[in-house]
Amino acid sequence: PERSTVVVGRDATRAGVPIGPDHFTLLAGPCAVESLDQTLESAEMAKAAGATLLRGGAFRPQTLPYAFHGLGKSGLRILAEAGAATGLPVVTEVTEVSDVALVAEHADMLQIGARNMQNFGLLNAVGATRKPVLLKRGIQATIEEWLMAAEYVAQRGNLDIVLCERGIRTFESATPATLDISSVPTVQRLSHLPVLVDPTHASGRRDLVLPLSRAAIAAGADGLLVDIHPDPESALCDGPQALAGPEIRELAAAIRRMAPLV
Ligand code: PEP
């Protein structure tokens, strides 16, 4: 009956970062790792805003085959270096079963993206690691399907699972996805797992990130995942949704006001 807390990045030298009911957690970083400078700068911005986990993409699934798919292995190294420099444990997506061991070597938490929520081979593979898993909701997944995807990870013995609502496809086309705020309290009643909200990928628009973040906090989310970039205009992917300096400060202030446990 009690809600779980998942600790990310705990080892012999670090206490780790808790995600759960008593610890509102901000995960932030660049949607795609582009260079060491850009990632370091993003990591510093994230930390200054109160983020305790650095989230960035090295393997980037994309709808368009011509879009930037990430730096792969060198992106993982850059992310790990930026994480070490700022003291922030690192979260990144893994898209292929064959990359799970490599990504687990460089990251403190493994993200399963919306497009892979029902990639059962991948769920089994991350379930066999001892790294916490961030499981995003599939764009067309019901809450039950999402929880059953988590069950795949759990049945391999890995119980360190954090869910992330990132919007679902509806008839509404004003935003890439419709943030399903009701999923937050619903999942918290059906499951003991922590639930984050990603207002960035749901809205695709930087001006909507702050209002959706406020809604997520008010609904009881255990944390937020947001994209940031030191220069969104030059971002290699998803620039229009990335927060830069002023918006990050505004978001940090809203979190301080509404979720003082951060
Ligand atoms: C991401 O988090 O980088 C991402 C692409 O999001 P999603 O899998 O939710 O589309």
Image: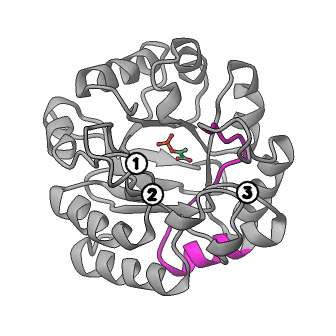
Tell me residue 140's x, y (percent). Answer: 34, 28
Q: CA distance from mark 3 to mark 1?
A: 22 Å
* Residue found 26% across the figure and 38% down from its top: 170
Number of numbered callouts drawn: 3
Q: Earlier in the sequence, mark 3 or mark 2?
A: 3
Q: Are marks 1 and 2 in contact (CB under 8 Å)?
A: yes
The residue type indicated by label 2 comes to Gly
Q: Is residue 115 left or right of residue 20?
A: right
Residue 149, placed above or below residue 74: above
Image mark for residue 204: 2
The residues colored magenta run: 41-62
Residue shown at 66% from the left, 49% from the top: 57
Q: Residue at x 51, y 30 (%)?
A: 115
Q: Mark 1 and mark 2: span between their CA atoms?
A: 6 Å
Q: Residues within 10 Å of mark 2 (few under 14, many from 20)?
A: some
Q: Amino acid at mark 3?
A: Val
Q: Which mark is residue 176?
A: 1
Label 3 – label 2 distance at C-alpha:
18 Å
**In the rendered view, does 64 fall on the left or right side of 242?**
right
Mark seen at residue 33: 3
